Image (tube, rainbow, N blue to C red):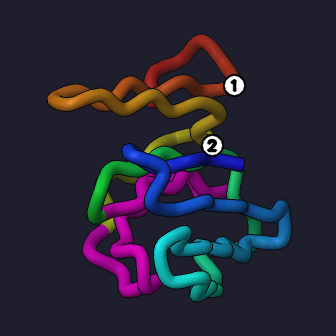
Amino acid sequence: VYFSFYYRYLILCNFDGYIHVYATNTNKVQNFRCSNKCYCIAANDTQLIIGTDNNQLQVRSFDGNAIKSLLDGTQPVSALCLNESCLFIGTMHDSSF
């Protein structure tokens, strides 16, 4: 479960790869699939950043459209932290992403 900046969106990710984005101002829900599994999410006002089981860090808009694959790694991302200018990525093991 993740709330976006200013609580505009409530974002839920399932381990089956589905992302559910609830817009708090319109009560609309967008559902889309990112991969077989979604391990973690982070968001800003316009984009979702998703760590998937296929060792990718995906960037998507809130309607589910893929913007690009940000990074291809050697292991799944297990933690994300996003602030105004930096994205911090954590993995399950000690080796680099």
Instruction: Tell whether 49 sits left or right of 29.
Output: left
Indicate left or right for 34 with 70 as reference: right
Image x and y of residue 49, in percent: 42, 54
Q: Quick one: label 1, few (<14), some, or many (20+) residues within 10 Å?
A: few
Q: Is residue 81 left or right of residue 79?
A: left
- Of 49 and 31, the residue lying toward us: 31
Q: Are marks 1 and 2 in contact (CB under 8 Å)?
A: yes
At a point 72% along the width and 76% down the height, the residue shown is 18
> What residue lies at 58% left-to-right and 87% top-to-bottom?
28
Q: Identify which amino acid the numbered label 2 is placed on.
A: Pro
Q: In terms of image quadrants, where is residue 97? A: top left
Residue pictured at 33% horizontal, 65% vertical: 69
54 part of magenta stretch: yes
Q: Position of residue 37 (x, y in %)?
A: 75, 64
Looking at numbered disc 1 in the image, what kind of residue is underneath it?
Met
**Which of the two residues, 48 or 74, is positioned nearer the viewer here?**
48
Cα gap from disc 1 to disc 2, whole angstroms: 7 Å
Q: Residues within 10 Å of mark 2 (few under 14, many from 20)?
A: many
Is residue 66 positioned above or below 41 on the image? below
Query: Is residue 85 a member of the stretch shown in magenta?
Result: no
Q: Residue furthest right?
A: 15
* Earlier residue among tags 1 and 2: 2
Q: Residue at x 16, y 29 (%)?
A: 85
Disc 1 target residue? 92
Judged from the image, the secondary structure of the residue bearing numbered disc 2 is loop
Please identify the dominant SS of the magenta region.
strand
Quarter of the rendering containing residue 77: top right
Instruction: Tell me: residue 4, above or below residue 9.
Output: above
Depicted 88 relative to depicted 72: above or below: above
Q: Which residues are magenta?
A: 47-68
Q: Which mark is residue 76?
A: 2
